[in-house]
Image (tube, grey):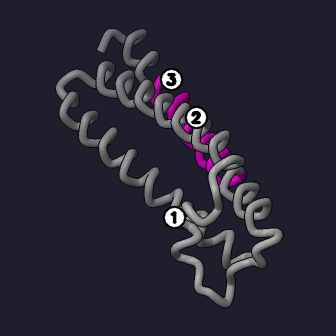
Amino acid sequence: MDEIRNIAFETVMRACGFGSLAIFCIMVGLSFEPRLSFQTGGLLMLVMVGILAFKAREATTKPYRRTEMWLYLPKELRPPERSAQQMISKLMRETYLTFAYWSAFIAVGMLVIALTFAFLGI
């Protein structure tokens, strides 16, 4: 079960990594105005939270054979057909919500930094 959980974590982490890279590039492009940069980064991270929450909701109804995680699972680690849908959907939902939770903390941190810059007049 731990190996399956690790694979689920890796697939969601890779997707979040690409999203975070895009957000970082936008923030670097706005680095001439630090408040705007962190404000934009925080708002885009909130968009990522929304997408992850949507994916978590969608995970309960998505067929397990159509998930990226299922493709990465070695055949010997795949759960039996009877319990695969319930197990995979629950695990993916949990993983998406975990990353949404972490992304929300990062978004709040960026927005607090932007607010601090606004109060300081920077």
Residue 66 location (% of width, % of height): 55, 61
Question: Closer to the camera, 87 or 41?
Answer: 87
Q: Earlier in the sequence, mark 1 or mark 3?
A: 1
Residue 33 location (% of width, % of height): 22, 21
Element assignment for label 2: helix
CB under 8 Å between discs 3 and 2: no
Residue bounds of the magenta highlight: 94-112
Question: Closer to the camera, 41 or 90?
Answer: 90
Q: Earlier in the sequence, mark 3 or mark 2?
A: 2
Q: Which residue is mark 2?
A: 104
Quadrant in which residue 35 is drawn: top left
Element assignment for label 1: helix
In the image, 76: left or right of 112? right
Q: Which residue is mark 1?
A: 68
Residue 112 has which mark?
3
Q: Residues within 10 Å of mark 2 (few under 14, many from 20)?
A: some
Q: Is residue 103 magenta?
A: yes
Closer to the camera: disc 1 or disc 2?
A: 1
Quadrant in which residue 8 is drawn: bottom right
Report the predominant secondary structure element of the magenta stretch.
helix
Q: Residues within 10 Å of mark 1 (few under 14, many from 20)?
A: few
In the image, 92: left or right of 21? right
Residue found at the far bottom of this picture: 76
Name the quarter where the C terminus is drawn. Answer: top left
Which residue type does callout 3 highlight? Val
Which residue type does callout 1 highlight? Glu
Asked if residue 8 is positioned above or below residue 56 in the image, the reply reads below
Residue 13 visible (yes or no): yes
Question: Closer to the camera, 110 or 64?
Answer: 64
Asked if residue 83 is positioned above or below residue 25 in the image, the reply reads below
Residue drawn 68% across the image and 80% down it: 78
